[in-house]
Image (cartoon, rainbow, N blue to C red):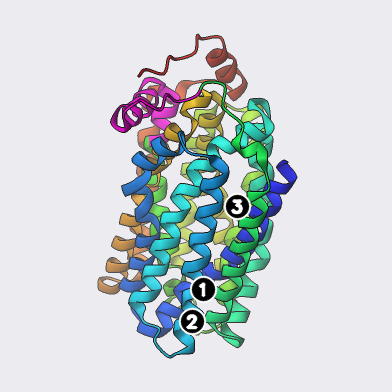
Amino acid sequence: MLRRYLWSRGISWTGNALTAVALPLMLFQLTGSAALAGLLAAVEALPYLVLGLPVGALVDRWSARSTLTVSSLVSAAAAVSIPIAAAVDALTSAHLILVGLTTSIAFVCFDAASFGAIPRIVGRDGIASATARMMTISTLIGIAGPPLGGLLAATAGGPVVLLIDAISYGIGALILAGIPTLDAAPHTAVPRRMRLRDSILEGLSYIRSVPIIRDLTLLGIGNSLAGGAVSGLLIVTAVRSLGLASDSAAIGVLFGAAAVGALVSSWVIGPLQRRLPVGAITIGALVASGTLLVGWAVTTSLLGGVIVLALWQAAATTVSLNGIIVRQSITPDPLQGRVNTTARMIAWGGQPFGAGLGGLLADSIGVRPALLAAAAVTLLTALGAAFLPGLRAGLLTALRADRQDQPPRPTTS
């Protein structure tokens, strides 16, 4: 069943990797605005910030298979609207931003359901391995997909790329609909009579009560703030700092470089968590991320940019993966959707602000100062991390054993 699930995700990720280049590229070609490029990145990140709490609570009650399937179909419909609009010469910047918003809302539902689906498919002991496998597949696709997306966008056009993405979503939905294990009941079901507000508060209470989850979640804000600035300004940086044309296929190489960095992170996170305390992993990765962001801000060559961006992404992804695996490994089954979605909502909360603010700063004071400001935020986050008590926790195996020895939390009604 895991193999079929991974096939579904892999097919969808292939389309996403192409669109990750084509959508912002179409917007920048249409408007030439760094602020709008940042707005698109902000809009794509905003749904998690706004909807994470209620969606996380709701998916713990919904059918995982239905949620994953319907979310994929909604994304397919949004993506296919772009080539349709382009065919009748009615494509606008507002339409592109609306599609980014719609697919991001669907992703919040999909992501929340997937947190509960993985333990049902592989069991709690297989979470770390399954997460690493998914990350490896997604980043391998991400390495080849963005350069191909840049090439397709430059030759066939962005609407063709979005059509491919829509087809990939549809195929992924069909595969997901045929995985009955996704509807297996968790060890403890969430009472249907529990009010939504109480369900949300229970997830928040758990995050607050477990120091390592609480502190890793808070640190994610600084990491995502800087990450939002980098992602929102990637095409702008390529054009204004590296001297690439806005329709250059080489822009896709930069997206691919970031995917290589994420792949490296997925390979090393397991060994790191077996050998180092989880707090030390996050602090070290934050320091590396901030330092590499300085390099990304000052580089003026494509080769230098590819190298630095890949290394930065490896460090930033390590911060995120460390928090995700810790949360999934020690959170009780009936709280998986709420806790993980809420924590990601908080941790990713900085991304839309980073993207929007980064775009405004780039237009007003320049791309380099905007990226240097993002580097300063990351390094300050690392400094603050050194004083958080939750990050004094030990190895992941010890954390998992400690939580399993405790009595299960009752689910109140």
Verify CB contact (< 8 Å) between mark 2 and mark 1: yes
In the picture of the structure, the residue carrying the numbered disc 2 is 84
Task: Give the secondary structure at mark 1.
Answer: helix
Question: Which residue is at the front of the view, 339 or 314?
Answer: 339
Residue at mark 2 to residue at mark 1: CA–CA distance: 7 Å
Question: Compared with residue 66, is residue 294 higher up or lower down, i.e. above or below?
Answer: below
Question: Which residue is at the front of the view, 207 or 4?
Answer: 4
In the picture, which quadrant includes the C terminus? top left
| Earlier sequence position, callout 2 versus callout 3 | 2
Quick one: label 3, few (<14), some, or many (20+) residues within 10 Å? many
- Residue at 50% across / 54% down in the picture? 71
Query: Percent position (x, y) of residue 76?
Result: 53, 65
Residue at mark 3 to residue at mark 1: CA–CA distance: 28 Å
Q: Residue furthest bottom?
A: 89
- Residue at 34% across / 47% down in the picture? 51
Which three-letter amino acid code belongs to the residue tagged 3?
Answer: Ala
- Residue at 55% across / 85% down in the picture? 157
In the picture of the structure, the residue carrying the numbered disc 1 is 80
Q: Main secondary structure of the magenta part?
A: helix
79 in magenta: no
Write the start and end of the magenta stretch as one range: 189-217
Residue 386 makes an appearance in the image: no
Query: Percent position (x, y) of residue 4?
Result: 72, 48
Question: Compared with residue 392, is residue 306 higher up or lower down, i.e. above or below?
Answer: below
Which three-letter amino acid code belongs to the residue tagged 1?
Answer: Val
Give the label on residue 262, or none.
Answer: 3
Instruction: Report whether 60 appears left or right of 97.
Output: right
